[in-house]
Image (tube, helix red, strand yellow):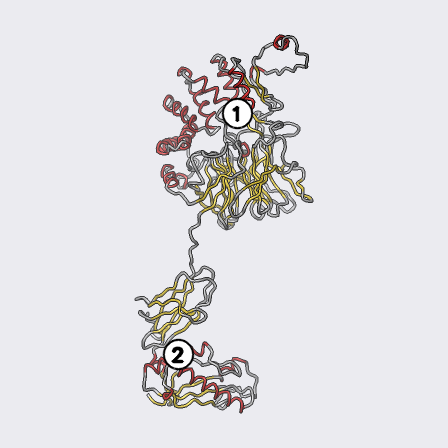
Amino acid sequence: MSNVFRFKKSLDAKGFRSQTVVHPETGLNYVYLSHNTDWKEVLTEVSSGFDGRYKGKTWIMEVDNGIAPDLSPSMERIKNQVIADQKVQAPKKTKGRISSSKDPPAKLLQKADAYFDKMWYAEAAELYEEYLNGHEDHYSYEILQKAGDSHYFNSNMERALYWYDILYNRYADEISSENIFKYAHSLKGTGKYSRAKRLMRIYDRRVKKEGMRYAVDDPRTTPKEKALDNILNTEQEYTLRNIATNSEYSDFSPMFYNGDQLVFASAMDSSFFTTRRYKWNNQPYLDLYVAKVNQESQEVKDAIKFSKKINTKYHEASVTFSPDNSTMYFTRNNYGKKLKRDKNGVNNLKIYRSRKVDGAWTEATELPFNSDEFSTGHPALSPDGKKLYFVSDRPGSLGETDIFVVDVFEDGSFSEPRNLGPEINTERKEMFPFITDKKLYFSSNGHIGLGGLDVYEVAYTEEEGFQEVKNMGKPINSKSDDFSYIVHEDTQKGFFASNRRGGQGDDDIYSFSKLMPEELNLNAIEGVVTDLVTGEVMPEALVTLLDENNIKLKEVVSDKDGSFVFEDLDGTTKYTVRTTKEGYSEVVMNAPTGDNEVVNVEVKLEKLEDLIVLEEGIKKIKLNMIFFDFDKSYIRNDAATELNRLVAVMKENPSMVIKIESHTDSRGPAVYNKYLSDRRAKSTRDYIISQGIDPKRIESAIGYGEERLLNGCDGSIRCSSEQHQLNRRSEFIIVNM
């Protein structure tokens, strides 16, 4: 293309008045010096122009009424008419059109209207500009509206705003609600949010006057200017990157594939000599491409065309894959041997399905709920592959395009399409759905947004269905079109497309990574210290956190209400909580943490004086059982905890003298049992002395074996391990206070 215009420029510099035209069948560009209404005159010019010496063949291009025929038909536009894969913006300068600057105004307007009716908005916009420039007498309501619409549907919001502003100021009493809506959107699209909010208030009043669609208590009846303020004031932390595979044309509709690949739609002109172009904005037809993705950096590279079985000479876009990547659904023009059109001349869209057989994609077949009379596109499978979401303007739609869903059955058939309803769909456009196991994401220009298409999220559960629709806010959304958002929920990394400024071309794909705040560590141990007998809270108790090796980690004092807490702990870790208070026995508890959760413990302190009891006329220090393992005499951890209580009592009563009696169960020889119990008594004594008690305060430590059983487990009856363990014990008798 650049060669064509360089050649034209060189001819113009030599004094020629050259012009350009696009061949309607091949899409190639040509430079010509003149054109005639009679083909015979063309042959005469060829003969004389080459001094009679030209002997080769001559071909003639016939152009009806000065407008190139529609031999490479356009796909319907996404932003104005239906869906997806025409999500492209008009180039700044229209290419490939015979100049009409010499045409009289009436002829100029006729051509502009013809282009507008065919939805060739880039061409129409240029001609309306030429027709209206310097001619205020041409400022009729219809022409101003079409001038604004031509730019609006190509996302040139600056020029759309220029003409809508004139339309509003000249025809304030006549302007329709639809035009007020587009006027407000063009204001948002140029960053003029204050003015946009005023227009939205006017639009709201008009809608209410003409009949509200929503109930009074619907969240969407919240004043739009307030909702817009909330969006403007909320900006989340994302890292955005324009990916390397973007071209000067449209690149959009990314989709995850095979774990480390990205499939997307692009109009990149990768084969200059064969690429067909469609008239709406003179870009190549869309194809599907696949590229490699670095999972860490999200760098996208090495883009190549997707399967030849899928890409055709017309548009393919908006793809989704089954969980096992063996089935794909995508959007394509409705065509057989040539493009098919409905009764209004519109070429609609359809969803096609292809299956992978022996590693290759098969010929695609269209889905049964397509139609020649309306568009169906933007497929999006649920994570389990059992539901297919899509966009359509079929009968029963609530707006211009709505999101629908069908069930996908095991035999490959489908349920009847169901509209997602007014909670999701508006009177405007909803499109580009993407569903995860947690949320539905989609783009819309009907919900409150920053301008153009915005990305929205809505939480979803099987039990409660769809929740409140929320705008994703900046920087995902902008005053331009933002759409085709996909994300990995676990990493919050993904991709979306936008035609915002600063891109490489038209619509560009951006990678994003949400900057997650450092994950909140909920692992904690909390509890309340109380008196064992009275239940009263115990302030100022010393609570110590120990690791599994009994190393002190943290220490706190219980609050006035007896509460304490240890925060920011490791998950799934063994901890011990030791609580002490003067005059009370020490309490040691195991408190293992879970996975990001709070562990609650109840600490009940017993007064040391309450441990001194009188049993059968004998004073004892009453502890919980001091247990020993079978045939062992070492002090277990649980035994140490109890013995610490005894040590505390003895320290509280410095003149106290005790004697220790140790007992076994009846298993094993009686002589050996007596020997074992004596070892246990002396092991107990040694532990107490190790805790700072004077050896003189322990009168004796004697083992009695199986001579003093607490139950009938003397070997004559069958007993459980637990029953035998009751007999393995130590007792502490107070000799002197």
- The foreground one among 195 and 198 is 195
Real-space CA distance between mark 1 and mark 2, rounded to the nearest whole angstrom:
89 Å
Q: Position of residue 458 (x, y in %)?
A: 47, 44
Please tell me whether mark 1 sits on a helix, a strand or a loop: loop
Q: Position of residue 471 (x, y in %)?
A: 43, 41
Label 2 environment density (alpha carbons within 10 Å; few <14, some 14–19, many ≥20): some
Going by the image, does 564 lie left or right of 388? left
Label 1 environment density (alpha carbons within 10 Å; few <14, some 14–19, many ≥20): many
Question: Tag on residue 119?
Answer: 1
* Quadrant (top left, top right, bottom left, bottom right) of the N terminus: top right
302 to 628, vertically: above or below: above
Query: Which amino acid does the dot numbered 1 rest on?
Result: Met
Is any atom of residue 394 visible in this view? no
Query: Which amino acid does the dot numbered 2 rest on?
Result: Asn
Q: Position of residue 634 (x, y in %)?
A: 48, 81
Q: Quadrant of residue 36?
A: top right
Residue wearing tag 2: 644
